[in-house]
Amino acid sequence: MDHQKNKLYQWRDCLEFNINTVHDLYSQYINKRQVDMVSSFGFGRGIATHAEGMYIHTKDGRKILDFTGGQGVLSHGHNHPRILKVRQDFQDEKRMEVHKHFFSPYMAALAHNIAQLLPGDLNISFFCNSGAEAVEGAVKLAYKYHDGKRKYILHSDISFHGKLLVTGGLGGSPEFHFPFPTIPHIESFTFDDIESIKSAVTRLKTEKGESDIYAIILEPFNASSLSQCSTAFLQELRQICNRENIVLIFDEIYSGWAKAGDLFYFFKHDVIPDILTYSKSFGGGKSSISGYTTRTPIFKGAYGSTRDAILHSTTYNGYGEETVTAIEAINIIIEEDYVSKSKHIGQVLHAGLNNLKTKYPDLISEVNGSGSLNGVVFNKDMYPALKAALNFVPGDLFKDEGFLGKLMTAAVMSDLFNSHGILTSFGENKNITLFVAPSLICTDEHIKTFIDALDNTLGKGKLKLLVAFATQKFLKT
Ligand SMILES: Cc1ncc(COP(=O)(O)O)c(C=O)c1O
């Protein structure tokens, strides 16, 4: 049956699209509401042509300083030359991408390298493609380690682990306002509160008085709210998990690979998890690769028998080019000392942001973060008046509570982009933080440019920024 409706595009056709064509195609074939939301910002009305290092170039000739760090993916910046070379070499030499019948020397080397960098017996790795997939693999591993005999998993009230059914159920993020089905017996504890862990551990026992909890999962550094667990909390948590034989999972998908100031945030606290999940900059900004690494006894207990050895697998486990990209990404992180870079970026950024907090006490209520993952929280005292004023604005965007909560941050982001060519993003949490999380190749000069621009933006005043943002949506060209 011939059912083709229109001609098919070639990939180079895309380079000729203007923004209206892209919006139309998104509206028709992807998600119309996404177009409404993102096109409220200047960047939603531009087309990126190429990107290099800290910069994105647009079709209208702008050179945008990217201070988002690509939502955690771009620690190496855009198109790092070493990452590109590895991929080009791999292609030019026609290396074998995948075959289930041959062992992958690349995957073997990647797993070896990770084991060298992680402490203790965190030795056994599994690679997949998205963060949520890594977390689901970790949860399965913990459940299987207990042979399906324990019922409960605990997660923090401040958490984000992904948007699949299991990981969605394990998230405490406000993004999850719809009750999708998930795995049973999920219980929540309060972030960084050891008493709430103790109370759950005391409560969730079998009839024999043994622990009925197979795993506790948390982000020691929650990137979306920039909340950090204390050393005392993490160390006591580790002791409880040891005593009760509960598998402790640290999700460092966002904070890992030097972004929060140490190679992994947990290094700072001298506490070793049973399973670690990671992703994002692990792929050097080019490869969608994620993974978990577990302690040898946990892996043996779960999948150590021949019968159970491949209870967990995926088609896209360790594709060649993805894997060699990750090998190179890690080697860059180590050889170019991204840990020191991240710490330095954190210090310089905090100094600049705290100066602005002193200068604009009516606007900035908080500056927080660690390493290159930082944020600014704005005062919310304008929202009630603004909400009333925006009721007459056509369309439903400004009537959405979630969007209104983001307005001040959105207004600042918008001015940074429109007036200064700087791209930022916001965190999805109760404070709606302006994310200031540049790549780890960011220099002091980039930070100065950013701080001067933010100073100029904030100097315009809250009202002017909010009105400019609210009206620009209806004045778009
Ligand atoms: C801590 C954490 N875990 C899991 C995920 C999910 O990763 P993905 O979006 O690749 O599924 C994210 C994504 O941002 C994350 O930050």
Image (tube, grey):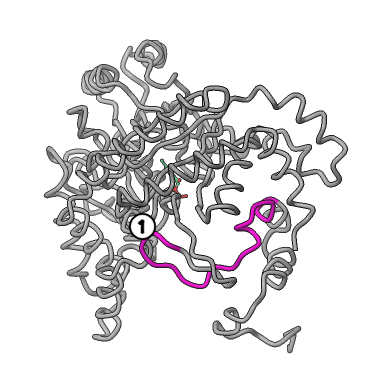
Location of mark 1 (residue): 128
Residue visible at 30% across and 82% down in the picture:
91
CB at disc 1 and ligand 1 closer than 8 Å: no
Q: Is residue 298 above or below residue 30?
A: above
Magenta span has 411?
A: no
Q: How many marks?
A: 1
Q: Is residue 395 above or below residue 194?
A: below
Q: Position of residue 38 (x, y in %)?
A: 65, 53
Q: Nearer the viewer, residue 75 or 3?
A: 75
Whether residue 296 is visible, yes or no, is yes
Magenta span has 43?
A: yes
Q: Nearer the viewer, residue 244 or 196?
A: 196
Q: Position of residue 476 (x, y in %)?
A: 75, 59
Q: Is residue 440 above or below residue 295?
A: below
Q: Position of residue 172 (x, y in %)?
A: 51, 30
Which quadrant would residue 298 be assigned to in this image? top left
Residue visible at 21% across and 31% down in the picture:
268
Whether residue 311 is visible, yes or no, is no
Residue visible at 40% across and 37% down in the picture:
374
Report whether 35 appears left or right of 345. right
Report whether 166 appears left or right of 7. left
Q: How dense is the environment of label 1, judged by Cα within 10 Å: few (below 14), some, or many (20 and up)?
A: many
Report whether 438 appears left or right of 8. left
Q: Which residues are magenta?
A: 37-55
Kind of residue at disc 1:
Cys
Q: Which quadrant is home to the N terminus?
A: bottom right
Secondary structure beneath disc 1?
A: strand
Which quadrant would residue 330 be assigned to in this image? bottom left
Q: Which quadrant is home to the C terminus?
A: bottom right
Q: Position of residue 463 (x, y in %)?
A: 70, 33
